[in-house]
Amino acid sequence: MFRISDFGFHYHFISKQTLNIVNDFFDDLRWRGLIHQSTDETQLAAWLRDAARTVYAGFDPTAESLHVGSLVPLLFLRRFQQAGHRPIALVGGATGMIGDPSGKSEERNLLSVEQLRANVHGIETQMRRFLDFDCGDQSALVTNNFDWMRKFSFLDFLRDVGKNFPVSVMLAKDSVKGRLGRDDVGISYTEFSYMLLQAWDFVQLFDEHGCELQIGGSDQWGNITAGIDLARRMRSAQLYGLTCPLLTKSDGSKMGKTESGAIWLSPERTSPYAFYQYWINVDDADAGGCLRMLTELDREEIEALDAARAEEPHKRASQRRLAEALTELVHGGESLRKAQQATEVFFGAEISKLTDRDLGEIFADVPSKELPRARLEGDGLNVIDAFVEANLAKSKSDARRNITGGGANVNNRRVEDIARQLTPADLASESVMVLRSGRKKYALLRFVD
């Protein structure tokens, strides 16, 4: 087993070997690939088995919404709560003013106080969807480290906390060493001090809530062990740390990144349809890991999906189940239903009860054209003219042949009458009409005032 020693006592990367002292909860975490590093796994597993514990994870408020990369630690907290422990979600209102240098090659841009407040509020609201805040002793808690950091003056913090923190510990951190060795970027004193603030968070939560375990992504190991060491020096307390892998693809790149940007948990930033489609399109090599790390499906179902993926990969059963489970968890059952309906629409299902935004998401890459809404009024727009306007027919005679031959559809409903006049009643949403020629050639007509 490979061991590392940062603070005079040993930590280790998790071995996959079966341990003598373990509980079902820890077994499940390990099977799902959720344990990356830990302070003495044998002791930690037994400690968690003996009593209900308080555990926390921190989230930087760099935006008003969490993204899919935040799902692993957030669902990690949720799993602990379901196992009978109390979760604390810490939103870094204070540390967010600085920015964590972990995993960053350049200095972060500092956010304004107003933007940070908005971000903290947005993230707190999202967390309430994943954690139970009304279940007795295991009720979740959201905290903001700005609440205690604002009480410190600079001199008080240096005197009371900083004197217990060896500079050698900070210099040994990989992200600091990497930045110190670069002439083009370097690292400011502000970001250099981040570890000290997060370490104090752990001590503060231990003092106020008896929190003895911090969890986070693997890039947080240095910050977590710094907090453990600070608590040992200042409180003579034994605290614990546990990290999970970062959410990455099989090629090592970060998951949740697309050409159009990150996949967010906020429906305003990433629609439920786009969220659903992202998971539908996950590569086969990544589907099994996502099912384990991100869903609450049981082992039997996941292994059955693994087998189906190996035998019939073209059916994409794993991806469909992954998309269903995550969309329902993040956005709810109604949003899942609409995302599934939207997917069916793209493959020919009749269109009803969708909005302009829905259709814009579904047919994002489909050509569209704007026409005056007045053309639908009165006698309406002849269906032949509509197909010509949408460039789905080269001429009126071409459109006529397509319609009489059964290849023309309006809102995925076949149109066979060349005299048909389209009116506002034929709109698929507030202002959009969907035309299709043949099986897959789509175009949108947008009618504007």
Image (cartoon, rainbow, N blue to C red):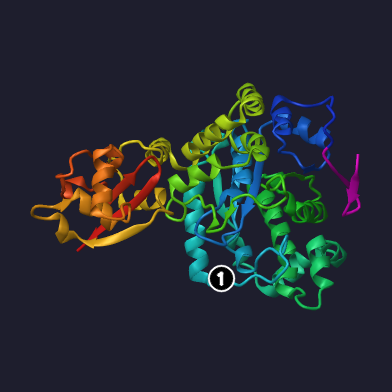
Residue drawn at (74%, 62%) of the image: 195
Residue drawn at (24%, 61%) of the image: 371
Furthest-bottom residue in view? 183
In this orientation, does residue 431 appear?
no
Which quarter of the rendered picture does the C terminus lie within? bottom left
Which quadrant of the figure has residue 153? Answer: bottom right
Which quadrant of the figure has residue 171? Answer: bottom right
**x then y, percent, for residue 394:** 31, 55
- Residue under numbered circle 1: 111
In the image shown, does 310 or 72 lie closer to the viewer?
A: 310
Residue drawn at (61%, 31%) of the image: 313
Can you say whether 263 is above or below 104 in the image? above
**x then y, percent, for residue 378:** 8, 54
Tag 1 secondary structure = loop
Q: Which residues are magenta?
A: 1-14
Callout 1: few (<14), some (14-19), or many (20+) C-alpha neighbours within 10 Å? some
Q: Amino acid at mark 1?
A: Leu
Residue drawn at (23%, 46%) of the image: 400
In the image shown, does 22 or 150 lie closer to the viewer?
A: 22
